[in-house]
Image (cartoon, rainbow, N blue to C red):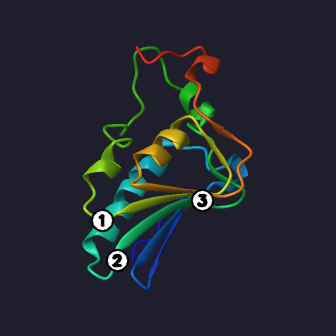
Amino acid sequence: MSSYEDLIYEAKDGVAVISLNRPQALNAYTAAMGQSLKRAVAEAVEDAAVRVIVITGAGRGFCAGADMDALRGLGKGSTWAGSGRLTTHALSIPKPIIAAVNGACAGLGFVHALMCDLRQLGELRDLLFSPSEQNWSPM
């Protein structure tokens, strides 16, 4: 089992639980977290004992979206390093992935939850996808 700086990976009884682990920032998503998530999902896929993957958030939120400080640091025309196809990566995984949404779920976090096969919603206060609030557009 690997160790990760920004998430927690635990596998037992056929279930791999991957917890986004930046609770102080409501698990705001960073490029490094994305790379860790991709590695952790690959680890679960390679483990024959794992039958299902659960992605959740540590603390009181699932994922509050992209880390705005990281986005502000990007220059015009630059891209988020390693962004690749992280949001659609879950669609290529041969094992079922469940998003255990345990709190705030917004923006990129909402997209990640939608890309999972199933979504289990706990007590929600914030479930939001509105790029227009940041004056962004998809084009």
Q: Where's residue 72, x and y in %?
A: 58, 25
Q: Where's residue 18, x and y in %?
A: 49, 65
What residue is drawn where x is 34% and y is 70%? 44
Disc 3 to disc 2, C-alpha distance: 21 Å
Disc 3 to disc 1, C-alpha distance: 22 Å
Give the side of residue 139 with respect to residue 21, left or right: left
What residue is drawn where x is 49% and y is 48%? 113
Disc 1 to disc 2, C-alpha distance: 9 Å
Above-or-below relation of 130 to 125: above
Where is mark 1, residue-wise?
A: 95
In front of the other: label 3 or label 1?
1
Where is mark 3, residue-wise?
A: 21
Where is mark 2, residue-wise?
A: 50
Q: How many marks?
A: 3
Q: Which element is circle 2 on?
A: loop
Q: Where's residue 76, x and y in %?
A: 46, 14
Residue type at mark 1 is: Lys
Outermost residue toward the bottom in this view: 13
In front of the other: label 3 or label 2?
2
- Which mark sits nearer the N-terminus, 3 or 2? 3
Residue type at mark 2 is: Val
Q: Where's residue 83, x and y in %?
A: 37, 37
Pick whichever, 90 or 76, lies toward us: 90
Category of crowding for the residue at label 1, using alpha-carbon neighbours closer than 10 angstroms: few (below 14), some (14–19), many (at least 20): some
Quarter of the figure that contains the C terminus: top left
Above-or-below relation of 132 to 47: above
